[in-house]
Image (spheres, helix red, strand yellow):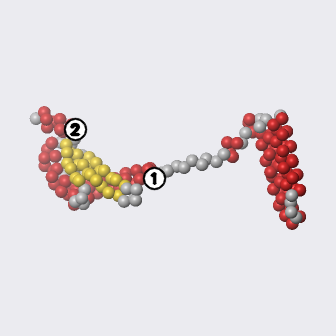
Amino acid sequence: MKEMLFSICAAAVITAVYKALIPSDRFSAQVKLLVSCFFAVIVINALSGLNTAWDISDILEADLSYNDYTVQVFGLAEEKTADALRTAIYKKLAEEGAAPEKIYIDVNISDSGTISISEIKLVFGSVSDYDANAQRAVTITRRIAGYGTAVTAELAPQAKKEREDQ
């Protein structure tokens, strides 16, 4: 209770001193409004200290944290780029009859925003598909992705085990 009364008295004294220091009557309406708002905020703040249900300090505090979304944006761009390239490669290889089971693409985005494809892996599900189509699929994929990109063909783990058993 002492804190509330002290806050109200301090606000009243500051308000009275401020009113006394006003240089002219020219801005008296604006100053009265400003002083009234200041006094009202002090009184409300003092009264809200009595009841914690009226605590509005959480509302008044601004969240000044910085959220950096570049990692998420770059990740999404990498994903979309890989999906578009994967679709184009799969369509072309399917037309040629050399479609792999899976296509893995490593996309890199630098800090300057340039996109590069470092590696493309073509994974074939069976030994017969690998033997018949791997080299042709690699050649076609290099034409699509560019000759600076590493393109490899490999067997799926189940097919590797199948080959070892033979």
Q: Position of residue 28 (x, y in %)?
A: 87, 61
Residue 157's disc number: 2
Is disc 2 surrounded by few (<14), some (14 to 19) or many (20+) residues within 10 Å? few
| Mark 1 residue type | Thr
Q: Position of residue 17 (x, y in %)?
A: 87, 52
Q: CA distance from mark 2 to mark 1?
A: 35 Å
- The C terminus lies in which quarter of the figure? top left
- Disc 2 or 1, which lies upstream in sequence? 1
Q: Which residue is mark 1?
A: 70
**In this rendering, would 132 be left or right of 15?**
left
| Mark 2 residue type | Pro
Q: Residue at x 17, y 38 (%)?
A: 160
Label 2: element kind: helix
Q: Position of residue 164 (x, y in %)?
A: 13, 35
Where on the picture, by quarter, is residue 54? Answer: top right
Q: Residue at x 21, y 37 (%)?
A: 158
**In this rendering, would 108 be left or right of 51?**
left
Q: Residue at x 13, y 47 (%)?
A: 131
Q: Compare residues 166 and 40 and report the one nearer the observer.
A: 40
